[in-house]
Image: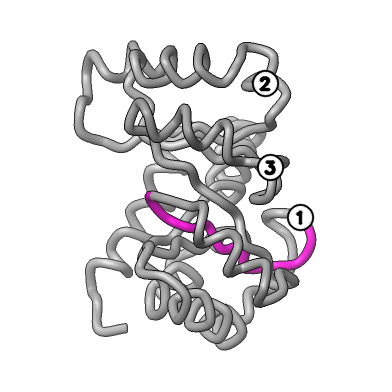
């Protein structure tokens, strides 16, 4: 799919996010080579701890693919240091405890955690989980280098389709309102 996407768009960064098992099954070098050949820019394996990432990171670095890590609100400061030493590209800060798409986003708490991370690294920090509309995206953009929206798009699509409407239009509308809020700036 990435290779097909690259036929139409060579510029938009592509990040693969998933679990270590398929990467390990394929082999780190083979995976890195295939991902690079397809046009992948980054990999986030949610279940490889930073203490165990050196072998896969070496293969990713060899082919120019960034190694992305998640940092949670519960991540201790010492572990953040370990993570930022092994990360490249950007860090993905999970703004909520629990599952994505649930809960209320506390933008002050997010800002405090992002500031703590930024004290330890120059790598950009993107924030995801709990960003569901223009207001929450704008609040996060005030402190983060990037805003990640996922579950809200899936939910908008599913709700529109189940109501007999065009899911693509619902997603486009939601993204448009988020983009407009971010473009207004003055966070």
Q: Position of residue 115 (x, y in %)?
A: 48, 82
Q: Nearer the viewer, residue 87 or 7?
A: 87
Residue at the image position 20 percent from the left and 33 percent from the top: 11
Q: Position of residue 52 (x, y in %)?
A: 68, 42
The Cα atoms of the two marked residues, 2 and 1, are separated by 26 Å
Q: Please tell me whether mark 1 sits on a helix, a strand or a loop.
A: loop
The mark found on residue 56 in the picture is: none
Q: Please identify the quadrant where the C terminus is shown.
A: bottom left
Q: Please, what secondary structure does the residue beneath circle 2 have? A: helix
Q: Disc 2 vs disc 1: which is toward the camera?
A: 2
Magenta-colored span: 89-98
Report the residue marked by disc 3: 52
- Mark number, residue 24: 2
Q: Which residue is mark 1?
A: 99
Residue 47 within the segment the image draws in magenta? no
Distance (Cα) linking label 1 and label 3: 24 Å
Q: Earlier in the sequence, mark 2 or mark 1?
A: 2
Marks 2 and 3 sit apart, C-alpha to C-alpha, by 12 Å
Q: Residues within 10 Å of mark 1 (few under 14, many from 20)?
A: few
* Marks 2 and 1 in Cβ contact (< 8 Å): no
> Split into 4 quadrants, where in the image is the N terminus?
top left
């Amino acid at each position: 799919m990435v290779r097909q996407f690259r036929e139409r768009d060579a510029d938009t960064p592509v990040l693969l996010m998933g679990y270590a098992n398929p990467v390990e099954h394929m082999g780190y070098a083979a995976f890195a080579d295939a991902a690079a050949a397809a046009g992948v820019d980054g990999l986030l394996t949610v279940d490889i701890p930073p203490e165990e990432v050196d072998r896969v990171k070496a293969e990713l670095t060899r082919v120019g693919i960034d190694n992305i890590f998640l940092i949670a609100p519960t991540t201790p400061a010492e572990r953040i240091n370990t993570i930022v030493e092994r990360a490249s590209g950007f860090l993905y800060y999970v703004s909520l405890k629990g599952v994505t798409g649930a809960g209320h986003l506390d933008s002050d708490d997010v800002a405090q955690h992002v500031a703590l991370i930024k004290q330890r690294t120059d790598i950009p920090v993107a924030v995801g989980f709990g960003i569901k509309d223009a207001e929450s995206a704008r609040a996060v953009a005030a402190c983060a280098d990037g805003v990640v929206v996922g579950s809200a798009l899936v939910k908008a699509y599913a709700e529109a389709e189940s109501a007999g409407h065009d899911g693509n239009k619902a997603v486009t509308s939601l993204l448009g309102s988020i983009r407009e809020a971010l473009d207004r700036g003055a966070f």
